[in-house]
Image (spheres, coloured by chain):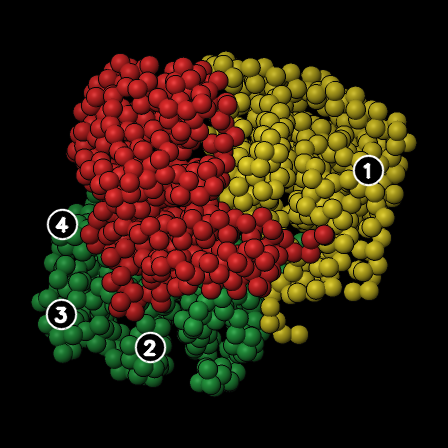
Chain colours: A yellow, B red, C green
């Protein structure tokens, strides 16, 4: 416990500014902010592991608004809310309906009278998801300002068209734990690589989130994809700037083999090309079913030309010590398991399977840390009181 | 805090009889009962605003049974349950199935073994909704009497064919806060007016609930609708009696313009005519799809003749000081926003938009007060203990 | 309270071994294990009845995974979880999809990072349900062993193809309360009888669970069904062995009248023949819709030859003192109520209706006891601390 109190003490020195600010994009947050999130997440995890209750809310709702399917993030949000004492209430909308204007303003108020957080996943429409979250956020501002709401609920991005911050932060936490510190990531080569998948229309938020975040830690970030599978240009340019500022590098290339050379870390994952997602968004908005079907056909045909972008033993042999850390947000398309040919071979995935589970296990704590730091002006002071109080999560347990 | 304790002390003088009695219709409750609900709701709201936990249940379920769609009331019920420490468990039925007899008796017991409250919305079938709630209630009586249930769960009407008491009581709480007291409502003119909507089959429970409740407070209640759009006759007659007894008035007329003259408060809202709802119920029971479609057609055609029943700036100009308080249970059909022509013009709604959000914000506390007064024989004693205990809702918070 | 402490003290003498062991089949548990579950369930029920909070978890999730419809067991699981302080999070899968291999291993980990229990219903496919639960369980073992999970969540069988242990244990608890003790069951004649139902494909788990469990208590267990309606042969053989060991008897016959002679307890309930369920499973796996329809046709025709297997007043007259205890897991198919002809006549069911509700009311406590005994190495020590702490479930209540 002494070590825990020392760590909490040191937290007080981090000049983060997270209170009362939504978590919508990692690139709106300072390095101090991100460091604080990682530390708080780690301490919540440590305390739960020691059967210390971190329940800071005696009551309160956490609203989830999933405008796309989710199991992992849904359970992570539920776990995080529960860890802090909040009850999840799901807002069930028609998935296809993009609500804006009046409806959003009103709904945001109606679901928030006794609500502490709203978590939103909206990743289907390019140019819409993050915008929708901001619309919810500014509606909450208005309602709070005019006394409609007793407190301003925090908004957490559970994946949008631009970023997937709870995923990328969980990934960063995993890297920090594997390598010992954020400093140790300097100079490490990480490859965010496109990989083949028989499905279509996977969001861009994970690769974008990874290149935007990892370039801030002095890493050598390689983005690899077949020509034509680019990401949102603005985010790619930001990754370049980040790398320059952090003393790392950022490179793009179009061969998986080339990219994997001497990689410390690999993240092979499928996504739809940016320009396809733009056309898809237009068709979805028009409700053009025939156009969507022909776009899907075209896209799957394109994909099928890149079936060799499967991460496998041959690729692994090229990496640093033939032993790069394999990462994935899960579920992966595993060749011969979940599909005929996919993002990764069965043998290669199996080597790292349990490590990908570990990686996923950080997400509930990252979300809880985002909530904690939104509500507690001094997270260190809050954590200190929790540790001092030392109330058990499972009561009456035998020693 | 001293003022809070004084207010709690005064509560003890209200001769309410709410314990162990379901809340199914406002007109089954005495004025003292309703006053107590309003006071308790207000104190729960005040205490939550001061970060005092009002969690009186350490465990227990609140079952919600929505036999019609709901977002606002669903969140209000979830918020109220959570505020008191209960966990919502949803009973998901086939919406179209009207269960009676054996099934209701059995289901009522099966969902109640560890349940403290059951909230029911059943507003589709005229003559059925409130009856269903009573069937549930008497099944609970039987099961409790014979030792099947350890306690008798309370039943709360979340909208039926006759009344919408959580809405009308929230509306009354809003009026009390706007005008300062229930006494201040005496002599105020409130207009419950039909308004045009492009949809069909909206329940009668809101206008019926409003005229039945507001006539008890010495108000001048005007019910306005196009000929043929009447409400359940028994409830209209009750409103007349209420007005006589309370020293107010109750009038019906068939012109929105005429009704709005010098109004203090206006509540323009669409509903389906009583006799149409009766025919609809018959057709629904028979499962006559063709009949339903032709009735809808007929009804929409009728509606379209009253498209000028839209509350707008012209109407507002007619009201007291051109500034009547606008009320709505939300969502409103706003012309040019949620539909081409609707219940209210965009400009007029926008003036009062945030006030309608305030109005909606009372509902969670009204529901919580109904629960609290059902369970605590002396609500004043219970509230006093909460205030004395002064346990924080958000723990470890910085001052 | 003194008596409660004495009973808790005596619990310490029962040599049960329930900690860290899933509850998948009653026949994997010793008599001491089952006795402990019954005692703990009874004490949780007693304490809740005295407004003592048995909330041992300050936070934590209980995941429910219903691969078949459920209302009763769903509410029982929710009630049990809530009673102990856990929050239910539902895992919503496609019902028809049998997930195995990679998917199960991964999903088991993903839903378990902050989870204390997983309750599973999977009763559609013969040979699959219990196997699926074991696959989940061994996936949890692996993830826990490798540090992916901070604790090993317990798995509870909420009905599979073989057993329905939360039902049969609730039934046993009911019998114990009716007759005063487990010892008093010795020599009692219980008839588990097939009964006619107009539906098809009802699981075998209830009759199998009953004959496997009740034969362990020295009862005279009669299994009655029309020729061709047998259960899984291995389970029938186990029931025979159990009866021999416990000093009871086990008999099969093919006439309801014969079976009911002098019965103390009767459990008339429909099920599908074992060999039909096997064929159905094959057809379901192949997705053979036409085959399934023709099997259903064949099966309903077979059923219709046994329409006289309805438990009614004539049958009741044959039982001990014309007054056998009637049991059912509910809902029963009641002739003239829920169907034209069914498992039991209206008059006969009505005599025992409230007793069947009582029977159902034990299930939440049985599930809670399974959870409690999984987590607390010494259930007696845990219960003692709860009783000593004597924290109220409903706080601030008036005396």
Residue B276, image x and y in percent?
20, 27
Please give the residue where the numbered disc 2 appears in the rendered image. C176
Inter-mark Cα distance, 2 to 3: 22 Å
Image: A44 above or below C289: below
Q: Nearer the viewer, residue A286 or A18?
A: A18
Q: Secondary structure at mark 2?
A: helix
3D distance between C-alphas at marks 4 and 3: 20 Å
Q: Locate residue B31 relative to residue B351 in the image: left or right.
A: left
First in sequence: mark 4 vs mark 3: 3
Other residues around mark 3 within 10 Å, as few (<14) / some (14–19) / many (≥20): many
- Specify the label residue C340 is tagged with: 4
Chain hosting mark 3? C
Q: In which quadrant of the rendered image does the N terminus of chain B lie? A: bottom right
Q: Which residue is mark 3?
A: C316
Image spot of residue B307 (x, y percent): 32, 15
Q: Are marks 3 and 1 in contact (CB under 8 Å)?
A: no
Quick one: SS at disc 3? helix
Q: Front-most of C393 and A33?
A: C393
- The furthest residue to the right: A247
Secondary structure of residue under mark 4? loop
User: Which residue was labeled with disc 1?
Assistant: A31
Q: Position of residue A295 (x, y in %)?
A: 54, 16
Circle 1 sits in a helix, a strand or a loop, which is it? Answer: helix
Mark 4 and mark 1, same subunit? no
Mark whose residue sits in front, 2 or 3? 2
Chain label for disc 4: C
Q: CA distance from mark 4 to mark 1?
A: 71 Å
Marks 4 and 2, how far apart at CA? 34 Å
Q: In this view of the protein, which residue sits in the foreground, A370 or B14?
A: B14
């Amino acid at each position: 416990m002494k070590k825990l109190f020392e760590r909490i003490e040191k937290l007080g020195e981090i000049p983060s500014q997270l209170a009362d600010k939504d978590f919508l994009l990692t690139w709106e947050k300072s390095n101090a902010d991100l460091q604080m999130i990682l530390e708080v997440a780690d301490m919540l995890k440590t305390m739960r592991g020691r059967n210390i209750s971190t329940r800071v809310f005696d009551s309160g709702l956490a609203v989830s608004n999933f405008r796309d399917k989710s199991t992992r993030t849904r359970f992570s949000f539920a776990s995080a809310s529960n860890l802090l004492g909040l009850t999840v209430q799901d807002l069930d909308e028609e998935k296809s309906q993009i609500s804006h204007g009046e409806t959003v303003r009103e709904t945001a108020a109606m679901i928030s009278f006794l609500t502490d957080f709203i978590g939103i996943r909206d990743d289907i429409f390019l140019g819409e998801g993050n915008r929708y979250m901001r619309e919810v956020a500014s509606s909450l501002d208005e309602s709070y300002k005019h006394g409609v709401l007793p407190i301003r609920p925090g908004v957490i991005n559970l994946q949008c068209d631009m970023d997937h911050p709870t995923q990328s932060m969980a990934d960063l936490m995993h890297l920090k734990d594997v390598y010992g510190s954020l400093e140790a990531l300097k100079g490490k080569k990480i490859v965010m690589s496109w990989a083949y998948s028989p499905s279509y229309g996977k969001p861009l938020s994970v690769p974008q989130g990874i290149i935007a975040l990892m370039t801030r830690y002095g890493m050598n970030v390689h983005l690899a994809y077949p020509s034509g599978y680019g990401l949102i240009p603005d985010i790619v340019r930001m990754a370049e700037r980040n790398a320059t500022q952090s003393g790392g590098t950022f490179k793009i290339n179009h061969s998986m083999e080339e990219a994997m050379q001497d990689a410390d870390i690999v993240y092979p994952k499928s996504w739809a090309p940016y320009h396809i997602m733009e056309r898809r968004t237009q068709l979805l908005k028009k409700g053009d079913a025939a156009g969507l079907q022909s776009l899907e056909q075209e896209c799957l045909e394109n994909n099928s030309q890149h079936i060799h972008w499967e991460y496998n033993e041959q690729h692994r042999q090229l990496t640093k010590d033939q032993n790069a850390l394999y990462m994935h947000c899960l579920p992966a398309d595993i060749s011969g398991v979940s599909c005929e040919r996919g993002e990764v071979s069965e043998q290669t995935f199996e080597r790292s399977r349990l490590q990908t589970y570990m990686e996923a296990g950080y997400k509930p704590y990252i979300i809880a840390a985002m909530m904690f730091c939104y509500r507690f002006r001094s997270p260190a002071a809050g954590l200190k009181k929790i540790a001092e109080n030392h109330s058990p999560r499972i009561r009456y347990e035998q020693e």
